[in-house]
Amino acid sequence: MTRFTGCIDLHAGKVKQIVGGTLADTDDSNPTVNFVSSHSPSYYARLYAESGVSGSHVIKLGPKNDEAALEALKTAIGFLQVGGGINIDNCQYWLQYASKVIVTSWLFDKVGSFQIDRLKAISERCGKDRLVVDLSCRRVASATEVPKWVIAMNKWQTMTKLELNQATLELLANYTDEFLVHAADVEGLCGGIDEELVEHLGKWAGSLKHNVTIVYAGGAKSIKDLEQVEKLSNGKVDLTYGSSLDIFGGKLVRFIDCCRWNQEHHH
């Protein structure tokens, strides 16, 4: 069944909501910001923990966020996932406080070639059940009717050589049991979810040998999106809300309604 799961996006030490496609790799980049919270990271960590919104993630968008991330994680030790700059050398440090670590860019080399050996190594070090692979993606032109998505890295700036499809999930599911899929093209725009991507994710997940959790992020703007994702993915994909949510200054979706959905659908 589709669940609501939460996010805490950190940029320059503050909880923010950012338009996904506008981040750059430099320290002083000025992404398009939808919201900067006056609340601390620990406020959101406590909110998710007390509301039982498990599987929620803290993402460090760029440098200078370690302290803020630790503050959130230590508020509810072992409850939140953490991502952003995770690699084989620091993963165990973060797993002292996080339920799982989320890895993306480190799995690719400089030119965007996927390094399966790195995935095997970090999976062995963390444990398959404590590793999430972030498959942030962008839609690319397709020669056929079937849409095509390619994994993006370095804060969604660089297109890798890895396509997001059934075969990719099949391969990765040997080493992880959870995927976080950011649809970077619609991230932060509150313009609606990528329905075709959600549908494909559900179909692919349904055909895997292994049981996996897939969390979709990007464009959600209505409480009805939970129902829609459940229908499109056959209940195989979970949904996170960002800029549209009232706790992030949004006017479109109430946090309390998302929590109610989880209570009513997951006894």
Image: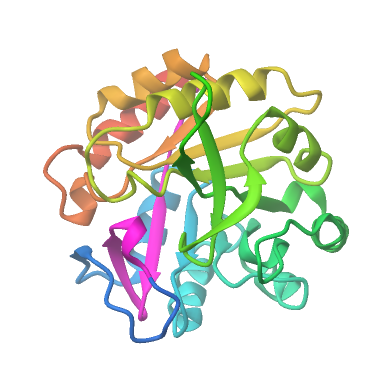
Q: Is residue 196 left or right of residue 111?
A: left
The residue depicted at 28 percent of the width and 57 percent of the height is 19
Judge whether 139 appears above or below 10 on screen.
above
Q: Is residue 71 left or right of residue 129?
A: left
Q: Which residues are magenta?
A: 1-23
Residue 15 figure quarter: bottom left
Q: Give x and y (percent) for residue 40.
A: 31, 72
Residue 23 figure quarter: bottom left
The residue depicted at 34 percent of the width and 86 percent of the height is 28
Q: Would residue 217 be counted in the magenta stretch?
A: no
Residue 112 figure quarter: bottom right
Judge whether 149 appears above or below 75 on screen.
above
Note whether residue 267 is visible: no
The one nearer the camera, 148 or 239, is 148
Note whether residue 175 is visible: yes
The residue depicted at 65 percent of the width and 71 percent of the height is 94
